[in-house]
Structures are given as C-alpha cells and as structure tokens.
Amino acid sequence: MRRPAPFALIVLLTIAGVRSACAASAMAQSMQMNDAAPLGMLWLDQLEWRAAAAGNAAAWQGEGWYGGDYDKAWLRTEGESSALRSDARMELLWDHALARWWNIELGAREDFGTGPARSWAALGVRGLAPQGIAVEATVYAGDASRTAARLKVEYELLFTQRLVLQPEMEMNLYGRADAARDSGKGLGDFAVGLRLRYELRREFAPYAGVVWTRRYGAAGGFAGTAGADLNEVSVALGLRVWL
C-alpha cells in the first residue's frame, strides 16, 4: 500500500515556500502603496483526526492563492490516510473572475495514494450562491477517456464572532470504472460533514465535528472487502489554520 507521507511533506514544503513569497510580496506592497499589486493567502481548512468503528484516519484539506483581483493561481490539496488505504489529490489552477461572486478555473489535478497515480485536466467554477453558500463545481478529463466530476458545497453559520458552525457536502462522480484505483462508474462517494470551531484567533481555530461518508460502486466494494463500513460515521477533531 502506498503511503502519502512524501506527498504530505511536499505539500507542507510548498505551503512554506509560497507563504514566504506572499509575506515578501505583502511587505513590498505596503512600501510601494500599489493597489493593483498581487496578494496571496494560504490556509488549512481541515487538519484533523477521525475516529470511526472501522479504524482511525488522518485527513487534511487546504488551499492557497496568489494573484490580483481578476486572475489568481490556486493550489488545492486534500486527502485521507488510514491503515486500510490512502487517498490524496493536488490541484493547480488558474482562476479568473467572471462576475462579482463567481470565478472560472482551469488547470490540472494529480491523484496519489493507494493504486497508480492519475493525472487530469480540470475545468470548473467557484463562488458564492445566495445566502452565502460557497460552491465549487469541477469537471475533469484524464487519459484512457477517463472523466470525473466533483461538487462541494459549504456554509458558515456564526453563533458569535468566534463560535462558527460549518456544514459541508462533497460528492465525486466518475465516467468510467478504474479498478486500479478502486473507483466505479457513476457516483463514487458522498460525504457530509458538520464541524463546530472556536476561533481563538482568526488564524487559529480548533474544532470538533462529525463526518458521514457513503461509498458506492467499486469504492464501496473495496471498503467492504477491506473491512470498512460502506456507510461510515466518524468523529473528527482538528484545527483550522491560516498560514
């Protein structure tokens, strides 16, 4: 079984490097007073430990951007690692503003973890729907006529200025089966999370929550043969960090 530890190290080194570049850029901008100068930001939205009946897992989800008001470079990464399997992905995207609250994205995605690596071209949109609901919808095209789609929806409900409830939904679909990476045709997985965080500072917020995951198709078959629950509920403890 392939472990994502080297990949996680690459992600952390990349984040550290981009963070330094962003800090230098911010200092230069403050000295030059250039309103059109590029800016940058990095954060780990989820860095957590999940406990479930089938076993524990470590999971992360982070992203960052660098650019101006209309065009940005985005780096996104997410993954999960347990004793049964590991799964991780990284996306590098060019982001262009289409409207006040909506952007179009174009770039590439790389899948790591259990099974062979897969490369994809990516095209998507992201933005804010009415009521402040954040939406990401992306379609992918890979080699051997592989296609995929991902939809993510989340919302932040503020109880106070520091206490925030964050519901989240994510689903992944595939145009054809990929037995080597244990993904079937159609809906591969569907996950709903509910996390309550307390922002000690805006840049540092511990949280606790629950995550329900349902696997389908070949992914469900793998989970069943590996001893995992196809309909899994996990308790999550983690940190949300701005870098």
Image: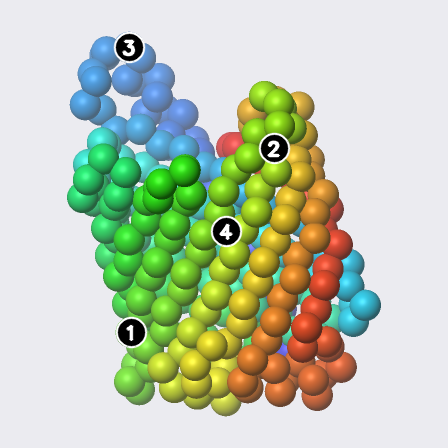
Amino acid under disc 4? Val
- Closer to the chain start, of discs 4 and 3, is 4
Find residue 58 and report its image quarter: bottom right
Q: Residue furthest right?
A: 53
* Residue at (36% x, 82% y) in the render: 175
For marks 4 and 2, give the CA distance.
27 Å
- Mark 3 residue type: Met
Residue 8 horizontal side relative to residue 109, left or right: right
Q: Is label 3 in a helix, a strand or a loop?
A: helix
Task: Reply above or below: 1 against 161.
Answer: below
Do labels 1 and 2 touch, CB within 8 Å?
Answer: no
Q: Secondary structure at mark 1?
A: strand
Is residue 2 in view?
no
- The N terminus is located in which quarter? bottom right
Location of mark 3 (residue):
31
First in residue order: circle 3 vs circle 2: 3
Counting residues from the start of the chain, the first of labels 1 and 2 encountered is 1
Whether pointer 4 and pointer 1 mark residues with C-beta atoms closer than 8 Å, the reply is no
The residue labelled by disc 1 is 141
